[in-house]
Image (cartoon, helix red, strand yellow):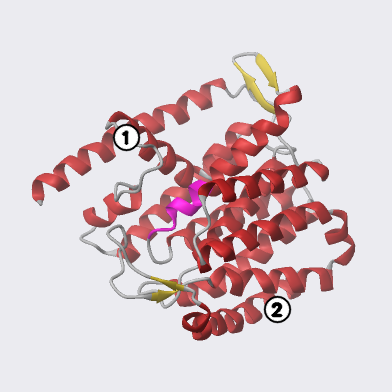
Amino acid sequence: MYLDFIFIFIVSLVSIRLVKRYAPKIGLMDVPNVRSTHCSIVPRGAGIGFYLPVAFILPVFHFDLICAYSWTVIAILIIFAIGVLDDHHDASPNTKFLVLMVATVFLSFDDIVITGIGTFFGLPITLGWFALPFTVFAVAGFTNALNLIDGLDGLAATLSIIILLTFFFVGYTHQDLFMMLLSGAFIAGLSAFAFYNWHPASIFMGDSGSLTLGFVIATLAIKSLAYLPAISILFIAAIPILDTIIVMVRRKINGKSMFSADRCHMHHILRHFFAEDTPKTVFFLGVMQASYALTGLQLDKEMDEGYMLVLFALNIVLLYLFLGAMIKRQKREC
């Protein structure tokens, strides 16, 4: 199994380099705006470079397993396609949500759907007919969350590798080969991408990468519900989730649209705190993510999740207050 990961890593190194070389000719360039942390035009679309090796190499080594999850493979493919379209010519939010909805329905054909969210204070909560709509909401929410966290060189790749390593461990522990292959393959591709994306980045993953990764991680999260309590997922994927919730709440309280763009994401605030040191910011958030993920792995499948949900909610409140105080201090310093 590990031989295919090595092939994916090597081919990704080459294919990302090719995307980088030809990006200007095919219109895959990222032009900086007021929210950008880079000042020059940089190639994007590296997601093409690490997704295609995964898509072509895994079936060579594991054709039967890939066929067994054919609907999931198709779902990931169409998310990748809309990501490529968005990199080349911005796709509308409605179009992306529609594609996400269709892709999530495809997941359900492989029985990858959230049927229950655990037991809270002695009350088991099953979703019944609401299972598919809730799954669409959860998948779309996390896919968007990972897309939003992709704001610093190396950040989305670092967080994704940590989250994928966690799911690889879950798959290994419970002998779930599909979880191991899917997570391991993208870890290999992202490791190659990190050579080009570490600060200062020479290419960005773009939506072809961030949307695909968000969807893959969401898929693995749903698969892991067979082995972990639902509350574990909030910890395993904590940083993108916490960042999205806090940013949207702050925008709502300030009378802005929850979907408006700004520079108040966690990574923007911390980067300013670390004197605009991008690697230090990425390292700090990576350690935070690893700590949350290790916490999620300690939780028992049969536990009552109510108290852990309260703990996670408390995390949201404390981080909101802490980051809000940092924003006010930084504005005074300016």
Q: Position of residue 145 (x, y in %)?
A: 49, 47
Seen in the picture, residue 86 relative to 297 is either above or below; the reply is: below
Indicate the quadrant containing the N terminus: top left, top right, bottom left or bottom right. Answer: bottom right
Q: Residues within 10 Å of mark 2 (few under 14, many from 20)?
A: some
Residue carrying label 1: 250
Say which quarter of the image contains residue 135.
top right
Nearer to the camera, 319 or 77 = 77
Give the residues drawn in magenta, as a range.
Answer: 144-151
Residue 296 appears in the figure: yes
* Position in image of residue 103 (x %, y %): 70, 49
Q: Quadrant of residue 224?
A: top right
Q: Quadrant of residue 67?
A: bottom right
Q: Which residue is mark 2?
A: 7
Compute the Cα span from label 1 to label 2: 44 Å
Q: Residue 270 got which mark?
A: none
Q: Position of residue 298 (x, y in %)?
A: 59, 38
Q: Does residue 179 appear to the left or right of 64 in the view shown?
A: left
Which residue corresponds to the image point at 46% horizontal and 82% vertical from the top-left? 24
With respect to residue 62, does 3 lie above or below? below
Residues 242 and 253: in front is 253
Q: Is residue 128 left or right of residue 215?
A: right
State the predominant SS element of the stretch in magenta. helix
Residue 230 in the magenta stretch? The answer is no
Residue shown at 34%/65% (left/top)? Answer: 279
